[in-house]
Image: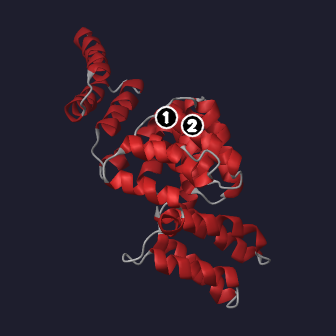
């Protein structure tokens, strides 16, 4: 719940800054705050105050960040919003049905609708999450986190067209969101819009060189048919992350490059690390059959 007050105050503030540099810093700070990265958000708020020491909004946000990062303080919403406070109490007691009932009784309350959407998403009930994210965004259209949550829910439902629309909306508010660009890259990859997917993942990596983004980049290269470069990327990744997915793609790259012995070895590693091996077993047997005929 700590994110709520910060997002409520930071996100609407972005447009009012007269200085283009500080406006960008507000964008970056709000993006970090959205994901609970308060230390990083504070860094950019401090940069604003170096440029504009009397910027009252930056001063207010710094005070909020300081309070939020203090573990002895309670969330603003849980102390001022009765519905949210009651729902949180039911959550602590493990009373999920009462938590949902409490939030559902206030259909015109933005935070209640947003909280319900988050609750359903956390419980993998994505259709319900979509419904309440939509209700939340109708009540407060400029609260960008609703669009990101909506995109995540749609993506989990494999509804990539609607996920793309939600991400595009989110990015109009958060131009420096590496997470959103990376998600849009994956979404465009699933829609076979590979040039845009590649552009998006490069945008994400330009903001933050996250290992999961490097994995997405390698998968896009494989989807494009650039097997040599994809294999090189997966080999680099395998030095840091030894997962079934990485070895699977290494095997698929080798298979596409007709390196059958290496493909078999990597698929075998993927099988060992996987809990669901049917697809991998089929590919292993397919490669082994070809090798046996040679």
Q: Is residue 189 above or below residue 293?
A: below
Residue, x 64% and y 31% (percent of image)? 161
Q: Is residue 100 above or below residue 294?
A: below
The image position of residue 104, as x and y in percent, is 53, 43
Q: Marks 2/1: CA distance?
A: 6 Å
**Residue 196 visible, this orientation:** no
**Residue 251 visible, this orientation:** yes
Q: Which residue is mark 1?
A: 126
Residue, x 45% and y 43% (percent of image)? 100
- Classify mark 2: helix, strand or loop: helix
Q: Nearer the viewer, residue 7 or 226?
A: 7
The image position of residue 121, as x and y in percent, is 46, 41
Q: Is residue 193 above or below residue 61?
A: above
Q: Are marks 2 and 1 in contact (CB under 8 Å)?
A: yes
The image position of residue 159, as x and y in percent, is 57, 29
Image quadrant assignment for residue 277: top left
Pointer 2 local density, CA inside 10 Å: few below 14, some 14–19, many at least 20: many
Q: Residue furthest left?
A: 272
């Amino acid at each position: 719940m700590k994110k709520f007050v910060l997002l409520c105050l930071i996100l609407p503030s972005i447009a009012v800054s007269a200085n283009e540099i500080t406006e960008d810093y507000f964008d970056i700070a709000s993006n970090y705050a959205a994901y609970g990265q308060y230390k990083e958000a504070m860094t950019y708020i401090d940069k604003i105050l170096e440029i504009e020491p009397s910027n009252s909004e930056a001063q207010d946000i710094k005070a909020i960040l300081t309070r939020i990062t203090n573990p002895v303080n309670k969330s603003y919403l849980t102390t001022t919003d009765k519905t949210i406070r009651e729902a949180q109490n039911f959550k602590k007691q493990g009373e999920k049905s009462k938590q949902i009932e409490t939030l559902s009784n206030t259909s015109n309350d933005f935070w209640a609708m947003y909280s319900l959407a988050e609750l359903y998403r956390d419980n993998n009930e994505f259709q319900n999450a979509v419904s309440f994210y939509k209700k939340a965004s109708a009540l407060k259209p400029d609260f960008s986190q609703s669009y990101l949550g909506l995109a995540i829910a749609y993506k989990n439902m494999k509804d990539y067209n609607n996920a793309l629309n939600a991400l595009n909306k989110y990015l109009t508010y958060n131009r420096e969101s590496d997470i959103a660009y990376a998600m849009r890259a994956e979404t465009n990859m699933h829609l076979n819009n590979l040039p845009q997917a590649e552009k998006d993942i490069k945008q994400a990596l330009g903001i933050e060189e996250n290992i999961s983004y490097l994995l997405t980049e390698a998968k896009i290269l494989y989807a494009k048919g650039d097997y040599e470069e994809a294999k090189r990327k997966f080999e680099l990744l395998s030095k840091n992350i030894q997962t079934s997915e990485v070895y699977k793609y290494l095997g698929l790259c080798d298979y596409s490059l007709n390196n059958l012995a290496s493909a078999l070895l990597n698929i075998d590693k993927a099988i060992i690390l996987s809990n669901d091996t049917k697809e991998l077993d089929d590919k292993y047997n397919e490669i082994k059959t070809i090798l046996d005929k040679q």
